[in-house]
Image (cartoon, helix red, strand yellow):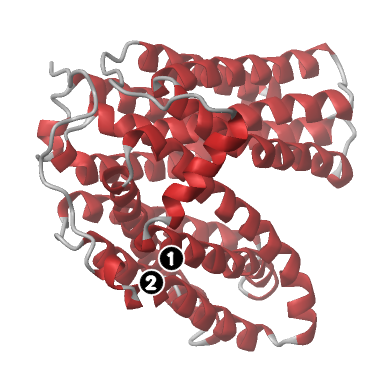
Amino acid sequence: MTARDLLRLRDVRLLLAGQGLSWVGDAFNPIALSVAVVLSGGGAAELGIVLASAVVARLLCTLVGGVWADRITPHRIMVVADLTRAASVAGMALAFAAGDPSVALLAGLAAVTAGAGAFFYPAFVSLRPLVVPTAALQTANGAISFLQSSAQVAGPVLAGLVVARFGPVAGFTVNALTFVWSALCVARLRARADHVAARSGMLSEIREGLAEIRSRDWLWTSLLSAAMFHVASGVFIVLVEVTAVRDLGGAHALGLITAALGVGGLVGGLVGMRLQPRRMLLWAFAALGLYPLFPLGFAWPGGLVPIMALAFVAQAGLLYFDVGWQTAIQQGVPHDRLARVVSWDVLISFVALPLGNVLAGPLSEHVETADLMVGTAVWMLAAGCWPLLVRSVRGFTRASEVPQPSAAIAAS
């Protein structure tokens, strides 16, 4: 099924329309929050508390969100999560419009927003097999990746213009309205799950998701690889920002590198839609092997233009991997346990990234930047590609058309 055929499906059009605008709106929140906190007399300490509360809330809610997405039809979780985020972000707008809100209030609202997001994402991944034919899942995941990358490129630009012209309250308002729009689009979806997980207690259901992972070699090895890879990514994210600002020309250089990553993400999504080999995980992990070129570029040749070129290639490979990986878990995991598996995937990555962020400081104090970048590249290559040694990873094949778990797939 081509992308054009996919867009003939009513539910797909609704899903893409809702999420596309919502992702653009997501860019407004961090910019509006940073500006609002500074203008109200706050600084790094206050902003840090608010952001930390969001991290903790997401960490606590991720596995619970996966359980509930498996318990009931995913679209219901998504609607409730979107409306909850709309209310909490609107609360931010009202708080700043009324005066200088307390840090405690802002932290609480940020925690609600992040916690609802932790419920939303596993349900979003679980919903796709209900609205897309099995053979078209990779095309759909590629289209979603392309749309999300486009929003990540355009969103910050629009957010900067709106917040600069109309102030942070307007930025929060736009974000809240896009959440409402997403909820309306998802609520109109016709696809529903025929079978949902039986309730057996929260902890028991969380363990069932973990047991699903442990029972599949391709799955647990891939998640272990993700944990290892994201530790290095956490280190690298910090090094990129510091090195770009200190050695490559300041904020302007960092902006150009970020733009190159955005364009690479667009290309990765497009390639994911068109290049669909039968041994999808084999090619996905091979594409992930391109990413270590990015940190290696800081050691040699080290100039801004080569680094931008390698950032483009690396992000294209990463996004192609992500399309293949999401398709694999959607096809390789029973649907009534899919959201729980996704939540474990998110949790593992979510914990590993800040661990890498913390390690970046001590490592950079004892190791030269160029050597640290080379070490990071080697670690990423080994961590990201060792699952290719596992037979079930190399042999995982893309599913052909099989009966859908949903009651119907609605066409226009």
Q: Can residue 43 be seen at all in this image of the molecule?
A: yes
Residue drawn at 15 percent across, 60 percent down: 277
Q: Can residue 28 be seen at all in this image of the molecule?
A: no
85, above or below 306, in the image: above
Say which quarter of the image contains residue 7: top left
Quadrant of image for the C terminus: top left
Indicate the amino acid at tag 2: Pro
Q: At numbered mark 2, what does the secondary structure look like: helix, strand or loop?
A: helix
Front-most of residues 273 and 277: 277
Say which quarter of the image contains residue 57: top right
Residue at label 1? 221
**Dot 2 surroundings within 10 Å: few (below 14), some, or many (20 or more)?**
many
Indicate the amino acid at tag 1: Thr
Give the left or right position of residue 408, taking residue 164 as reference. left
386, above or below 187, in the image: below
Quadrant of image for the N terminus: top left
Residue at label 2? 387
Mark 2 vs mark 1, CA separation in Å: 6 Å
359, above or below 371, in the image: above
Front-most of residues 38 and 86: 86
